[in-house]
Image (cartoon, rainbow, N blue to C red):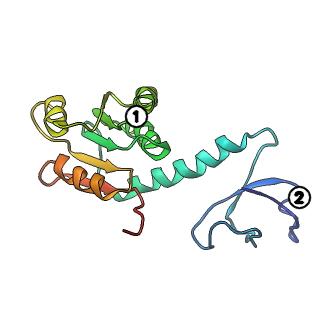
Amino acid sequence: MGIVEACPSGRYEEGERVLLYGFDRPLFQHYVLAQDDGGCIRLPDDAESDVVLMSQLFGTVLHAFYKLDDIIGQDVVVLGQGPVGQLFNAALRNLGARRIIAVDPLVHRLDIATRMGATHTLSPDDGLVEQVRALCDGELPHMVVEAVGKQASFQLAAALLRRNGTLLYFGVPNKE
């Protein structure tokens, strides 16, 4: 997100707020030379910065679904209920997942998860695999989304998934 300082083509006016998108430039730059053929979205003057910035993250979450098969009627576990996990809950709900099982150790995140679309919430305690299986009619879920980025959650994601299921590693790990 930024403010236009100059636009030789006149497409944007000096002082306008814009949201940059695309993967053709490095992130976190002080100045960006955007092209006229795209890469910027004009923002309303009253757009709240925190809402705008979440829309950028939500776009990244939605882009992950382009690589996945249809999820209508499927059971999905979302490991991690930070901002990314919460956005996955919302997307999965709107894309037709049958059960969305949110997993996180923090109770306040699980409270939000139900408002964002999760049908069930669980803490990652002992017996999680059995709890998930019970919620999914004795089976493991069709898909697991890993939105934490920790080695332990990578291993847990694999343990929760049914044979030939879909595992989406979305969390970015530290250099371990």
| Residue found 39% across the figure and 34% down from its top | 93
Above or below, 130 relative to 167: above
Residue at 88% across / 58% down in the picture? 13
Q: Earlier in the sequence, mark 2 or mark 1?
A: 2
Is disc 1 placed on a helix, strand or loop? loop
Percent coordinates x, y for residue 25 in the rendering: 63, 73
Above-or-below relation of 164 to 73: below
Mark nearest the camera among 2 and 1 is: 1
On screen, residue 22 versus residue 61, left or right, reads right
Residue 149, located in which quarter of the rendered image? bottom left
Marks 2 and 1, how far apart in space?
A: 45 Å
User: Going 14% across and 55% down the picture, which residue do you hit?
Assistant: 164
Amino acid carrying label 2: it is Glu
Counting from the top left corner in percent of width and height, residue 150 is at 35, 56
The residue lying at 44 percent from left, 37 percent from top is: 90
For this rendering, which residue is in front, 157 or 150? Answer: 150
> How many residues crowd around disc 1 within 10 Å: few (fewer than 14), some, or many (20 or more)?
some
Q: Quadrant of the C terminus?
A: bottom left
Residue 26, quarter of the rendered image: bottom right
Q: Which residue is mark 2?
A: 13
| Secondary structure beneath label 2 | loop
Q: Which residue is mark 1?
A: 106
